[in-house]
Image (spheres, rainbow, N blue to C red):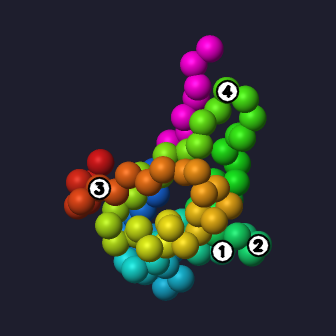
Amino acid sequence: MSTIIPVILCGGSGTRLWPRSRASKPKPFLPLVGDRTLFEATVGRCPTSAGFGPPVIVTGVKHLEHVEAQLDSNPDAQIIVEPSARNT
């Protein structure tokens, strides 16, 4: 059986929830519901059972600091950093 690798796309421009979110801290990195951020809650939902590998996080350079700071719940996660936003 193949291993399933969860992939989390994480970033944003911080315009939709202004003034709470900003370009420097878009909504995935804000604790909107409860104490955890949307990003932390998403990583927390990644299965750790048999058949699943650690998640892969895809983010931009400007959000790398937030991703690394909030990944303490899953230290095995891998991070792929896109060098520039492509609006994809």
Q: Looking at the image, which is closer to me, 27 or 42?
A: 42
Q: Which residue is mark 1?
A: 31
Q: Earlier in the sequence, mark 4 or mark 2?
A: 2
Q: Earlier in the sequence, mark 4 or mark 1?
A: 1
Q: CA distance from mark 1 to mark 3?
A: 24 Å
Question: Farthest top residue?
Answer: 1
Q: Earlier in the sequence, mark 3 or mark 4?
A: 4
Dot 1 lies on which element?
loop
The type of residue carrying mark 1 is Pro
Q: Work out whether residue 36 can be spotted.
A: yes
User: Where residue 59 sits: x, y (%)?
Assistant: 39, 58
The type of residue carrying mark 4 is Gly
Q: Earlier in the sequence, mark 1 or mark 3?
A: 1
Disc 2 and disc 1 in contact, CB within 8 angstroms: yes
The type of residue carrying mark 2 is Gly
| Residue at horizontal 32 percent and vertical 67 percent from the top | 61
The segment highlighted magenta reads 1-7
Q: CA distance from mark 2 to mark 1?
A: 6 Å
Disc 3 and disc 4 in contact, CB within 8 angstroms: no
Q: Which residue is mark 3?
A: 82
